[in-house]
Amino acid sequence: MTSSLIRGRPRRRAPSLVPARLLHTVLGGLAGVVWLVLPGVTFHSATPVPPPSAAAAPAATARSAPASGGTSTADLVLPLVVVVAALAFGGYGYVRRTRRARTRTTPGWATAPAADAPPSLPEADDRARALLVAADDWVRVSREELGPAEARLGAAAVAPYARAVREAAAELSDAFRLRQRYDEGPPADHDERRQSLAGIVARCEEAGWRLDADADSFDQLRGLERGSAPGVVDALVAAETRFRELGARTRRMATLVAGLGERYGPAVTDSVTGSVEQAKDRLVFTTFRLNEARQAADRGEPDVAARQLRAAEGGIAQAAAFLDGVERLAADLESAERLLPATLSGAEAEIAGARETARDHAAAVRGDGAERPVTARGHRFVRPGASGARPAEPLLPADMLLAQADVADAVLAAVRTEATAGPSDPVDALRRVASAVLPLAAGRAGAVPFAASLVAAHSTADADTFIGTHRGAVGSEARTRLSEARRLRDADPLTADALAVRARELAERDVRGHGNPLSGGSGHESGLAGAVLGGVLLPPSDGDPQGAVGPPPSFGGPRTGRRRAADPG
């Protein structure tokens, strides 16, 4: 996995050929100069040459006469021609290379002009948002496909791929964290903004590359690689078994939702309204896909069978997610109902302790002659602590601490009244108590922090289910808030709960704005529209509602996630 110190750096460019051509030009010129000078160089021997005979002397003298005076003009022509040709060739190569570099448009050179003309901030922001959505889908789909593989092959067999998903999820979490900081307050400098967005893009790409690296071997493990019919048939049998289990479970969940409404009030089931119906819709879609997968396997078409199987597995996973959400709501309501009395008692202890701390602090300040706390303006700060101890680290003004205790008392009284008046939402009651009391808490009673953790876990899981089952329409903002809620769930449950609730609201807004992904009624009757909305199938190309839907996404990233697409033609 890429080190955090080098993550986000641009790739190194291939070395330019311009210096090489200049070197060739210089070497050619030097060669020409040497050729030009060489004829004028004379080598003298240490051994004297005997004089020629008298008869031959005049003729020899006549032949050597031009040489004794220097190099002739004819001897200089060829070296000069070579020098001129070398310079012309080098200059032509340089100009041609420069012109090609400016006008080249092939993908391999796409990074060359990027340094000269970087994308605008809106373009970089759009790319970062799009990659966050895509990377989140890659991780979700890959984790989803691990389920049937582990159920059939065992946890040990899929352990390397589970590790790959965890590593990709860690990169994605870092990207979401950068996005959260950017949304909270982007840097004032444009270059810093661009660098922040580039860091988001780099981490998303790293997550995709990590999943792409293991996609082929994961298919081999599952037996879904090209031409492997037995693996497809075995996985198909497991999917059919899981499908029948969910069919029976759906009927029980419908009864459970009705019972929750009667016991806790109709408002308590708002978060799962329609969940059972959507689970049935995904199962209808799965029925068609399982039938097509079985027929393709019988015809000896393993590739078609594998594609339909993946679509069926996606439908099964989302139907299970809807039903799990109903069961989780029932379990959380029951847990909150049991925890509420202890939380109220713990909250009373925290409130009483906060008041005692404020009084003891004021008494301690008066006792040692120090400056009295300024209660009107709130200049003197105290941290709730042990009785009689002067706090070392300030937190709240003493008068503010007392005022907060009064507010918390009022919240507790309202919760008690609602609990005794009739059906009420115990999870919401815990949320209100924890929000009012935790700012005063000093660890006197563990029930209040535990209640806050339960509420944060409930809202985070609820938002995650909604986003995962509607991921075809949910944008980056809701996913970013959900990721931050996960990160803060243990350290700051109140903030995590608020972020998760906001994530669900943003996701619902995106779904309302998305509209119907397919036109016509056939898509709804077969569950196709719900499958596209849920990301079980990729949407039609270019967003054309009249076009054919895309393939089911599979384990992998940008290079391999769409490998189940049907062959063109």
Image (cartoon, rainbow, N blue to C red):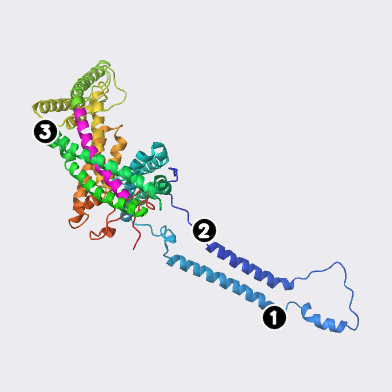
Mark 1 lies on residue: 74
State the residue in front, 412 or 323: 323
Task: Of the two numbered discs 1 and 3 on the same chain, state the one appearing first in sequence.
Answer: 1
**Secondary structure of residue under mark 1:** helix
Q: Quadrant of the C terminus?
A: bottom left
> Position of 115 compared to 482: left or right?
right
Inter-mark Cα distance, 1 to 3: 114 Å
Question: Quick check: 277 left or right of 6?
Answer: left
Residue 2 position within the rendered picture, expressed as x and y whole percent measured from the top left: 44, 44
Q: Residue furthest right?
A: 54
Amino acid carrying mark 1 in the image: Ala
Q: Which residue is mark 3?
A: 262
- Secondary element type, mark 2: loop
Q: Earlier in the sequence, mark 2 or mark 1?
A: 2
**Visible residue check, residue 39:** yes
Q: Residue 349: name its quadrant.
A: top left
The residues bearing labels 2 and 1 have C-alpha atoms spaced at a distance of 43 Å
**Image x and y of residue 295, in percent:** 30, 53
Q: Image point 55% across, 62% down: which residue?
A: 19
In x, y percent, where is residue 194?
36, 51
Rendered residue at 80%/81% (across/down): 65
Q: Which residue is mark 2?
A: 15
